[in-house]
Image (tube, rainbow, N blue to C red):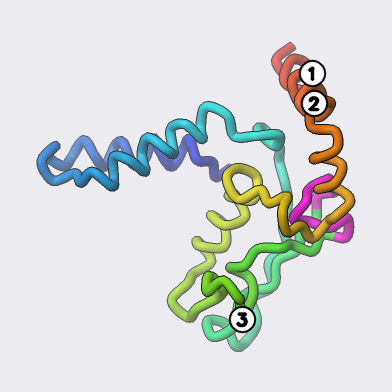
Amino acid sequence: MLTLASKLKRDDGLKGSRTAATASDSTRRVSVRDKLLVKDEGYYQGGKFQFETEVPDAYNMVPPKVKCLTKIWHPNITETGEICLSLLREHSIDGTGWAPTRTLKDVVWGLNSLFTDLLNFDDPLNIEAAEHHLRDKVSQEQAYSRLMYLSQR
């Protein structure tokens, strides 16, 4: 399974081969941010999710089609598996949509980010899930704590 924690371990291994003088401040700042994300990867930490990816004949000029096969209550994934991720849009208003320079690896990292730092409650695809989260944030945090407790037993 691809996780931010495994990416950080791999990146730390690469840093060991570089000299400290060559590491830039921005690299260190991102590293600190990533390390904070690893501490708490959100409500979906430890979950296993399956996705179906269809790569069209026109790929790399058009994005792949991705569907979540795992039933999940998520503001950016519908109950039928449709995914709201600007990276998967051919034309995106925010300018972060698909480009021919993007790869399937970018798609995987984007999907991973939906469960960590790109969780979006302001512009959801599954409005009911987002409203539920915003309305009942305390109950969800309690449910998450209970889920973590049960998973450690």
Residue 118 visible in the displayed image: yes
Instruction: Measure the C-alpha gap from mark 1 to mark 3.
Output: 41 Å
Instruction: Give, as a three-letter code, the residue at label 3.
Output: His
Q: Nearer the viewer, mark 2 or mark 1?
A: 2
Q: Which residue is mark 3?
A: 91
Element type where label 2 sits in the image: helix
Instruction: Measure the C-alpha gap from mark 2 to mark 3.
Output: 37 Å
- Which quadrant holds residue 139? top right
Q: Which residue is mark 1?
A: 146
Whole-percent x and y of residue 32? 37, 35
Q: Which quadrant, please, contains the N terminus?
A: top right
Q: Earlier in the sequence, mark 2 or mark 3?
A: 3
Q: Residues within 10 Å of mark 3 (few under 14, many from 20)?
A: some
Residue at horizontal 79 percent and vertical 60 percent from the top? 125
Q: Which residue is mark 2?
A: 138
Magenta residues?
70-80
The residue nearer to you, when weighing 140 against 113, is 140
Residue 72 visible in the displayed image: no
Q: Is residue 107 left or right of residue 13?
A: right
Q: Which quadrant, please, contains the C terminus?
A: top right
Element type where label 3 sits in the image: loop
Q: Residues within 10 Å of mark 1 (few under 14, many from 20)?
A: few
Instruction: Give, as a three-letter code, the residue at label 2.
Output: Val
Q: Is residue 146 left or right of residue 58?
A: right
Q: Nearer the viewer, mark 1 or mark 3?
A: 3
The residue nearer to you, when weighing 54 against 126, is 126
Residue at horizontal 52 percent and vertical 27 percent from the top? 39
